[in-house]
Image: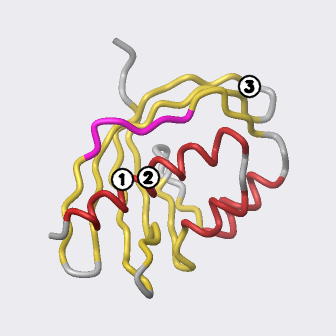
Amino acid sequence: MKPNDVESIIRAEQELAKAHLTLDIGSIDALLHEDFTNGQPEGKIETKKDLLNSYRTGNRHWNRAEVDELVVKINGELAEVTGLWKAAGTNNGKSFDYQASFVSIWMKVNGTWKNLSYSSSMLSPK
């Protein structure tokens, strides 16, 4: 495991979270692999296209989008990241404020780490 790969993946996770705050679709698109899938806590599976289209509606806004407690394990061209996602904002006029544990799979493509898969589980409020 190369330290610079771990740092690159952590930076990419942080950039992805930051891009949610401004709905920077270009940055989100660039960080996601073409075959990206997102496993929602309620069981729905979204593709990259589904996710980006939902953001393009303008119905979702974030006041907080953070990743924390990141642990990176690299195996060749794949990396597994576990961590804590903290988010708050509105979606279709309804407020949300939650924390979730997540597993994020990254793939190195032409020297750049791309998010291939993401899945999260909501945590109960403390």
Q: Nearer the viewer, residue 59 or 13?
A: 13
Q: Nearer the viewer, residue 8 or 66?
A: 8
Q: Residue at x 74, y 54 (%)?
A: 54
Q: Which residue is mark 3?
A: 94
Quadrant in the picture for residue 22:
top right
Give the color scheme: rainbow, by chain, secondary structure or one colour.
secondary structure
Residue 59 x %, y %: 82, 40
Q: Residues within 10 Å of mark 3 (few under 14, many from 20)?
A: few
Q: Which residue is mark 2?
A: 13
Asked if the residue at tag 3 contacts the one at tag 2, i.e. Cβ–Cβ closer than 8 Å, the answer is: no
Q: Is residue 3 left or right of residue 19?
A: left
Residue 115 versus residue 121 in the image, above or below: below
Q: Residue at x 72, y 47 (%)?
A: 23
Looking at the figure, which quarter contains the C terminus? Answer: top left
Q: Main secondary structure of the magenta part?
A: strand
Q: Nearer the viewer, residue 23 or 92?
A: 23
Asked if residue 99 lies in the magenta stretch, the reply is: no
Q: Which residue is mark 1?
A: 10
Looking at the figure, which quarter contains the N terminus? Answer: bottom left
Question: From which residue to which does the magenta span run?
Answer: 65-70
Residue 49 x %, y %: 68, 70
Asked if the residue at tag 2 contacts the one at tag 1, i.e. Cβ–Cβ closer than 8 Å, the answer is: yes
Q: CA distance from mark 3 to mark 1?
A: 30 Å
Closer mark to the observer between disc 2 and disc 3: 2
Q: CA distance from mark 2 to mark 3?
A: 26 Å
Q: Secondary structure at mark 3?
A: strand
Residue at the extreme front of the image, as rendered: 4
